Amino acid sequence: MSEHKEITVRAKVREGRGKNDARRARRDGMVPVNIYGGEGDAVSALAPLSELAAILRSEAGRNTIFTMDIEGVGSSEVMFHDRQVDPLRGRLIHADFTRLVKGQKIEVTVPLHLVGEPIGVREEEGHLEQVIREIDIRCQPRDIPDAINVDVSNLHVHDVVHVSDIPAIEGVEILATPENVIATVGIVKEEPVATAAVEEGAPAEPEVIGKGKKEDEEGGESKE
């Protein structure tokens, strides 16, 4: 878990609610957002796109804890709960934030990173396959790890590492099913080379036209 950096995003209450108001806000470099939960009322606001985008690009990404200071309302510690991105431009166009309550655990999703080169890859011509790349956890907001590392260096071919193999992390509860497979080392199967239909130098069998006899029986005269 990286050292927590204090970040404050200053926002203002959103007055309009229509699509035209939202479009105007986005043209001005602002993003419509909602803040709810915790000990306050739900608030709709406008926050700077550049600052929210920088948070999402940071190491902690959507799990970053920061202060949202809304003009005329006050400040709260928040985290991203949901976000909407323009699929064509890749630009954040809306976000929901959850207020954090001191002492209250939250559920978040964090990345799973595989660490080390398996023996099965290094010495046995195997291939490492990562089955799941994220995992759900429950913990205090300040205890959220940037990622959970899983050591795979001792895996041989056909070995499997499960969720239950993740070492215990103080203050962090793993919510995924223990039997879920995280990664495995398999063998890359080569495609069999197609056998030639005709061996080199061997005469090819003649093509058979199969309807002649039937036609003779049905429409032709007997030769007897």
Image (tube, rainbow, N blue to C red):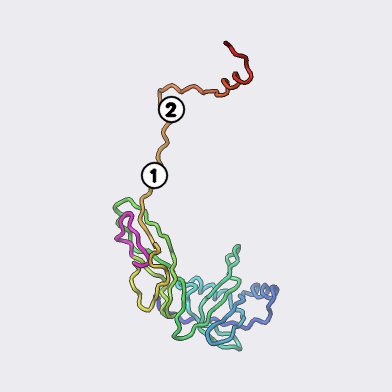
Residue 150 at x, y percent in the picture: 35, 66
Is residue 156 located in the magenta-colored stretch of the structure?
A: yes
- Looking at the image, residue 62 sits to the left or right of residue 162; the answer is right
Residue 146 at x, y percent in the picture: 42, 72
**Residue 174 visible:** yes
Alpha-carbon span between mark 1 and mark 2: 23 Å
Is residue 101 located in the magenta-colored stretch of the structure?
A: no
Q: Relative to 40, say whether 113 is above or below.
A: above
Say which of 69 and 163 sits in front. Answer: 163
Q: Amino acid at mark 2?
A: Val
- Looking at the image, residue 166 sits to the left or right of residue 15; the answer is left
Residue at image position (46%, 78%) is: 106
What span is in magenta? 151-164
Residue at image position (48%, 85%) is: 101
Q: Relative to 77, say whether 88 is above or below.
A: above
Residue 96 at x, y percent in the picture: 57, 76
**Residue 121 visible:** no
The dot on residue 190 is 1
- Rendering quarter of residue 29: bottom right
Q: Amino acid at mark 1?
A: Glu
Residue 9 at x, y percent in the picture: 54, 81
Name which of mark 1 and mark 2 comes first in the sequence.
1
- Looking at the image, residue 36 sits to the left or right of residue 204; the answer is right
How many dots with numbers? 2
